Amino acid sequence: MKQRSFLSTSTSPDRAYLRNFSAQAGAVPQRRTSSASKKKKENKFKLFAVGLGIDMPFLITVILLLTIGIIMMFSASYPVALAEKGNSYYYLGRQLLFACIGLVVMTIASYFNYHTFYRLTWLICGVAVLLLIVVLFVPSETGIHRWIDIGFTDLQPSEIAKFAVIVFFAYWGTKYQDKMKYMKYSLIPGMIVFVGVALLLFFEPHYSCIVIMFCLVLFMLWFAGMSPVYFVAIIGLAVAAFVIAKATGLLGYAMERMDGWGQALIYTTDEMWDATWQTRNSLYAIGSGGLTGLGLGNSRQKYLYLPEPQNDFVFAIVCEELGFIWAAIILCLFGVLVWRGIYISQRSGDTFGKLLGCGLSAQIGLQVVLNILVITDWLPNTGISLPFFSYGGSSLIMLLAQMGIVLSVSRTSRIEKV
Amino acid sequence: MANKQRTIKDKLRALSENIQRNFKLRSNILLAIILIVGFGAAICRLGYLQIFMADELQQKAVDQQLTDTTISAKRGTIYDANGKILATSASVWRVVLAPVYFENDEERRFVAEELSEILGIDEETIYEKSQAKLYYSEIKRKIESDTREKILELQDEMKEKDINPNVVFLMDDYKRYYPYGDLASSVIGFTGSDDQGLSGIEYQYDKELTGTPGRLITATNAQGTAMPFQYSQNIDAVDGHNLVLTIDETIQSIAEKYMEQAIEEHAVYNRGVCIIMDVNTGAVKAMASVGGFDLNDPYTLPESALEEIRKLPEEERAAAESAALSKMWRNKAVSDTYYPGSVFKMFTAAMGVEENLVDESSTFYCPGYYTVTGQTMHCHLRSGHGTQTFRESIKNSCNPAFMQQGEKIGTELFWQYYQAFGFSERTGIDLPGEANDIFFSEDGSMLPVNLATASFGQNFAVTPIQMATAVCSIANGGYIVQPHVVSQILDDEGNVYSTTSTEVKRQVISSETAALIADILEENAVSGSGKNGYVAGYRVAGKTGTSEKKNDSNGDGVDDYIASFCGFAPAENAEVVCLVFFDTPTGDAYYGSQVAAPVFAQIMSEVLPYLQVATQYTEEELAQLDTIAGTYVGLSVSDAQTAASADGFTTSVKGSGDTVLAQVPGAGTPIPQGGNVVLYTDEDSAKTQIEMPDLTGYTVYDVNYLCSLYDINISITGATDSYLCTATSQSIPAGTMVSPGTLVTVNFTAGGFSD
């Protein structure tokens, strides 16, 4: 009903989208009721199939990854928790709490009408930008301003920012879906958003998030329908830049500057040894795992050799304990999640849902790939967490909330519901 | 062409528009990129690391996770024949730094400063070491327990300061310790800084003594504390085997004592050697290369050598020092060769007898020289010995007689016997650095003149151990035995690991020949050229030797001489062989009979009673035999006098008391028969002291007279059969204040230049 009132007051292109949406929203249940009234009745009694029903494969994959993630985070973290906090269960307890909160948030989000985000786009963007600015002024001992203490946990504004970017381009792509072929509506706003966010992240600094942002903006513009010509151009430029950097030796210089990126095993100086400590021990852990692993709980590298094994490098311990086979299986699970998220979103009834769902799903895939490349020393060690596995309150809650949104999208999706 | 290009362009444009219009296609393309490129790359990378790099990475991980600590094995102990410890390893510690655990420079500075103070090492050196990313960096070795206490205190202090205590740790170590210092130094040898044997037995038996170091492999976390996972392995150190030597500390000490005295007395320039060997087993009971060096401090040269080095120009000092060190460490008994000289005549004689070329009835004429192929060689007695029997020729040590015997034997036989007596090969004694002999040719061929000189032991060189082994064969009935210094190897629990059994290599001469030669040598030691080697009460056989080295090592303008004596006792059923030789005596005397024979007598007169060799006195000797003084203290003067005369002593009473308060010599002291016991009857008289007179240079008669004047008892050793014998040494130096009645041992040596 709210939507209708919103519709009546709006004269912008939004109106067209919402009109379209309300027609669909109305149409889908009608069609369902008309085609199979019995089925609808059954759906009512299914736990998660209330209303239009959510996608069970996606939900199951999320729960599976979350479970494995928490177990492995615990396994990786107990020695360091004991050493630093005096309590082996410190990280596990907190992560479980966050997971519970996250699951509640996810459930709520799955019931939440995601179209609301369309209207809240500017608010979300405003909050995200505000937080990105505020975080720069939070005092920090290390000179790295990434977290805002919000009492029970730390909030990472960049997590909000990533969501905001997805929501923004979902909104933009919906609003100007017919004009995306023009540079003015696609490439230019994309560049503006990226440069703006990147600047703020630069001051944190949070370089890895800049990389993620770059990819996210690209992904969203692609989903939104920017001309492939531009992508060819951008990728061409990126490749050219890489080749030039490599040829001129700038790349090597950059690698050295970025904490000895790619040089974990060939350190030459004591500074380099210190700088590559975490990555080197990550490689030791991964390599030690071999094909079948040392067995759950049997990691040695977690005994204070690999610093912060509960965070970005948790998957290194996974590799050490479970081996390559299970590491690959877990990666496949992530792949399934990404595929299912996009599959759901493709079948969403409206453009906003499609863009939002695809963006959120692709973001998971992006994070996973970048995280693996970081822990294997192919990308600089700059703090990219692994979804579901890495310890972190705000990011886990945020992640599950986003999964909730994808589930919410799945309610309007024309897919087979269990 | 243009058309075709256009169609491709058109197709591309159509595709592009299609992609733009079709969301599903677009999103599928990106999904594919993420899954194939992204996940594909991630899985490939993981696979590469976990499959192809696995071994290398795991090795590196294990390297840092496992702390591999070497546990030093205790080096085996070296015992003498009676179980006295000659070399042992004592516990010490080594200080090790694990600088990887340092967290900041402040900690490094603190630890460097403290360690520098405790260990006396330059602070900067430690500070530099503390900057390496290492788990093991040795700072100092072989610290003693007091230093260890200080290190433990430092560790406590570090704990208080919140410095990882694993930064500095101690490891068990051992230090070699030689309780007897310089005793048998060149035989026992010493070890280097890594406990590795560098010379002597320490080197020869290094493998047995070393043992196997153990390893303690523990998994540790990055802080160096134990990691709770099953990856610790403890391989115990196996301590080295212990050695029991045939060397007897007592005999060795006796030998070294008299050798040292003689070296000083005769200003011997190139040290001296004494070998005492069991004739039947080849067990070396003493092997002394005197002067030796302190095994606990083997790199310190004696002051005299240092003085000579200081005289050299700066640039030559280092070379001179190392030369002096290796000379000091050298075991002359096995590593040096010498011209055996007249000692060798016993072998020439044995060859002739064994081959029936000479016998007791053979006579030899000595006009004072002998000419071989136009070359005239003189006898040491220029006037000549005239006609002598075979027996006399040995006793006279007559060179022309032996040149004639050599001629009879001939080159071929001489070489065969030379080989058979073991001179042409190394004895194979279990000591390092054994030298080869130096003969005229490899195959034994020689000129007649060579044979002539060889027959009296000149112009070829053998090692002292070869000579001692060969003399054993004369003493034991003709058998060449394997000389050895290690009798048993015990494991670390004291069980016998291996025992050296007597190895008889071959019989060279018949027992009859050996007995004849031994008999002649015994006579020689009593009344011949070897009489200075005579030991009363024991049937000693021996032969002197003086040889020219034909070079001048000390630069005194005179060719160097070697004075030697080799003999055994008893002459029948011999037990020990003793070889004594002095390399380059620079004093007035240089003949074997003057320099070496008395030392042989001194050594044997202590060694033979110690070995409990049965005494066989001549009647004359029996008359002079020592009697043990009884206890006369506490008796009345008259009772004491009665008791003393019953024991065969005269008495002299000092003081005016009635009761004997003290006696000199004390109860239990052996005194030659007819000796004088001084009885003290009051306290004043007991304090009387007299000055020991200088007895050297006097004849036996004079010495006896002097001592009776002084109320001093004398015990006579050495040659006393003629008035030519004079006292050469006395056990209590002249000028010492002694109580009347004190017993002094005086050694007599026959004069004259007999060789």
Image (cartoon, coloured by chain):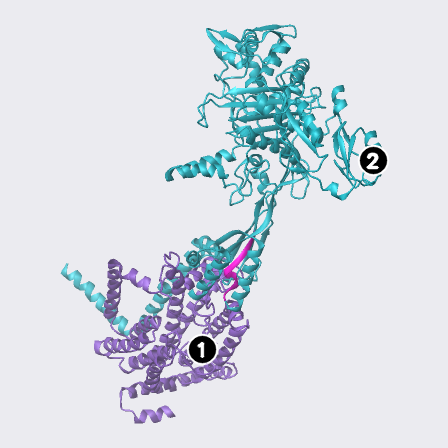
| Helix, strand or loop at mark 2 | helix
Q: Is residue A16 above or below residue B709?
A: below
Determine crowd level at label 2: few under 14, some 14-19, many 20+ residues with C-alpha closer than 10 A.
Answer: many
Chain under numbered label 2: B
Q: Amino acid at mark 2?
A: Ala
B153 part of magenta stretch:
no
Measured as percent of width and height from the top left, residue B693 is found at: 64, 32
Measured as percent of width and height from the top left, residue A117 is found at: 36, 84
Q: Is residue A363 above or below residue B341?
A: below
Quadrant where the N terminus of chain A is found in the figure:
bottom left
Using the rendered view, name the quadrant where residue B732 is placed: top right
In the image, A121: left or right of A392? left
Q: Is residue A266 in view?
A: yes
Closer to us: B548 or B132: B548
Q: Residue furthest left?
A: B2
> Badge 1 is on which residue?
A400
Chain letter matching colour cyan? B
| Helix, strand or loop at mark 1 | helix
Q: Residue at x 59, y 26 (%)?
A: B580
Q: Residue at x 53, y 76 (%)?
A: A93
The hue used for chain A is purple
Q: Amino acid at mark 1?
A: Leu
Q: Residue furthest front?
A: B656
Determine crowd level at label 1: few under 14, some 14-19, many 20+ residues with C-alpha closer than 10 A.
Answer: many
> Badge 2 is on which residue?
B640
In the image, A392: left or right of B418? left
Measured as percent of width and height from the top left, residue B170 is found at: 54, 56
Chain under numbered label 1: A
Separation of disc 2 and disc 1 at Cα? 119 Å
Read off the magenta span: B163-172
Q: Nearer the viewer, mark 2 or mark 1?
A: 2
Using the rendered view, name the quadrant where residue A230 is placed: bottom left
